[in-house]
Image (cartoon, rainbow, N blue to C red):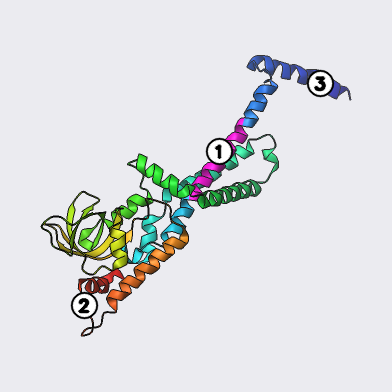
Amino acid sequence: METSQTNQPDLKNQILSRIEKDALCPDSRLIISSKEYAMWGLWFLTVLLGALSVAVTLFVLMHRQYSFYQVTHTSFLTFMVDVLPYLWIAMFSVMVIFAVYNFRHTKHGYRYPLWKILGSSVILSLAGGALLHLGGVGFSLDRTIGNFSKEYTSQEKLEMRFWQNPEEGRLVGVFLGAEDGVPLPLVVLEDARGTRWEMNVAELNDVDIRIIESGKRVRVLGVLENALPAQFYACAVFPWIYEQRYSMHELGEMKRSMQERILRHTQALPGVVEEGKCSHLVLKGAF
């Protein structure tokens, strides 16, 4: 008992000496509360950024299943390797780590096990990302950043890269109509690089003609006839899907229409229906 009483003054003196030596002073309640709110704010921000990453990733995964990858790639696997949003996937992973860190540094964060904090942060980001995707935020965010940043490769820029390739029978452009002195069925299309193509539309159906005459940017599947002068033989025309947001149903209808038009070319029977250049293109590897 006496030893305990003797040690108490020494302990008290040591604490007071340490406080005096380190010039320690208690923080006000306002500062402590501000730090707490700041950590909660940072946690919310990291979860929100994680949700935005999920929204863009969901947009890519849902949108790209309706892409005409059979025309641009050898397989769906190689196509997905090219289009997956690795930047957003990495950002989601980093934001989850920061969310766990920020939650742990809140007032009672230490009480919760790591798996609960990690699980709740991931679930909230996934749920928030799904809601944002349904509202079109993933599409808008990817397209907006792509328009303002040359370094960011948006899905629209990727699609342009895949389709602006006349050597492989693909063009992106806007229909300008028929020029004077150019006989039908030849029309003029200005591609994404500003090159004007004399395009033969003899094998296009009424749906293709309506799409190409809309005045909007389109994708054209066909055959390169000449590079100089620029001459292209059109087989099918599809809308450009990045000027507005399409529903899953609309994208599915576009893909179904594309498949039907390609089948129309491949089912041309020798001796009954004359095979055109489009049949040759499709048999070479479009499908």
Categorize mark 1 by other alpha carbons within 10 Å: few (<14), some (14-19), many (20+).
Answer: some
Observer-nearest of 57 and 196: 196
Q: Quadrant of residue 186?
A: bottom left
Q: Is residue 48 above or below residue 134?
A: above
Q: Position of residue 121 (x, y in %)?
A: 60, 46
Instruction: Give whichever of discs 1 and 2 has the lower sequence position.
Output: 1
How far apart in space, not on screen, are marks 3 and 2 (Cα)? 103 Å
Give the label, 1 or 2, closer to the camera. Answer: 2
Q: Is residue 144 left or right of residue 175?
A: right
Q: Position of residue 142 (x, y in %)?
A: 42, 47
| Residue occupying the point 64% across, 26% down | 34
Categorize mark 3 by other alpha carbons within 10 Å: few (<14), some (14-19), many (20+).
Answer: few
Magenta stretch holds residue 45: yes
Q: Which residue is mark 3?
A: 8
Q: Which residue is mark 2?
A: 275
Categorize mark 2 by other alpha carbons within 10 Å: few (<14), some (14-19), many (20+).
Answer: some
| Three-letter code, disc 2 | Glu
**Mark number for residue 278?**
none
| Residue occupying the point 66% across, 25% down | 32
Q: Quadrant of residue 84?
A: bottom left
Q: Which residue is mark 1?
A: 45
